[in-house]
Amino acid sequence: MIVAGHQADLFPYSGFWFKMAHADVFDLKIYDQFQPRGYQRRVLMRGTWASVPVVGDPRRCRIRDVRIDPDLARVTLRDHILGRYRGSRHWDRYGHQVLAMIDEVHSDRLWHLNLNLILSIRDLLGITTPVAIAPAPSGRGSEGLVSMLRSYGATTYLSGTGGRSYMGDCREFAEAGIDVAWSEHHAVTSDSVLTLLMEHDDPMAAILATSEMDMAPQREEVSA
């Protein structure tokens, strides 16, 4: 049982989807501390930040508690996407589908918006991994991760390389009988997944890339 996870981000970049595609279960972390300048409310679209406005001051909130004005969020996201991607090589294939995803969300919770968009993009990409939300973790850092993994009966935790900064020697995982595997993803862009959809002939090839050579032919075609 391979489990991966990530915060409930806005139209996440390719590394998010790489982990999801290689996991048996993908845990969406909604109990983590919200970061006002983090990726839950903003993402790069063609190299420029696109943000969703939030209500009030969420600096002390968990991700699950951050609120939005749903009407304003939909209008803002639509404007960002139309401004950045309309006219892209695959706009006619994906553009209106993405706008429809946004129009279907009416919740005042930021994580609800992001979850619905994540599920819709997952289906569009043909990824079949179930997305789940574990109970609030007991403990912080590695201790909290282990509690989440135990709730799924995980035997392997697939982590992004950023996890090395707080997972240390992974002793807690070994003691729990859980192997740690590090993502080998090679990001061809730090942009939102929308850039892959709109500009690449095969978005999943970019998502599954593990070295610069994996995407060389397609990158040449895009830049031509």
Image (spheres, rainbow, N blue to C red):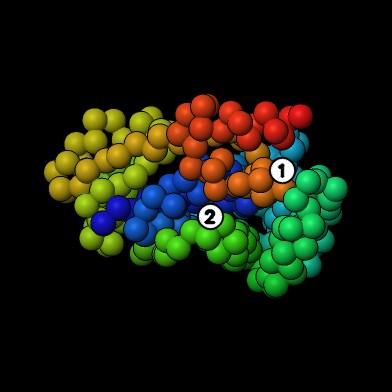
Is 36 left or right of 33, judged from the image as shown? right
Name the residue rendered at 78%, 46% in the picture.
89
- Classify 10 Å Cα crowding around label 2: few (below 14), some (14-19), many (20 and above): many
Name the residue rendered at 60%, 47% in the picture.
203
Q: Which percent across, then down, holds residue 181? A: 30, 39
Amino acid type at mark 2: Ala
Residue bearing the label numbered 2: 8
Q: Which percent across, then down, holds residue 99? A: 76, 63
Disc 2 secondary structure class: loop
Name the residue rendered at 72%, 53% in the picture.
52
Amino acid type at mark 1: Glu
Residue bearing the label numbered 1: 199
Label tally: 2
Name the residue rendered at 72%, 58% in the picture.
94
Q: Quadrant of residue 115?
A: bottom right
Q: Quadrant of residue 49?
A: top right
Compared to 51, does 102 lie above or below? Answer: below
The answer to whether residue 68 of the structure is visible from this angle is yes
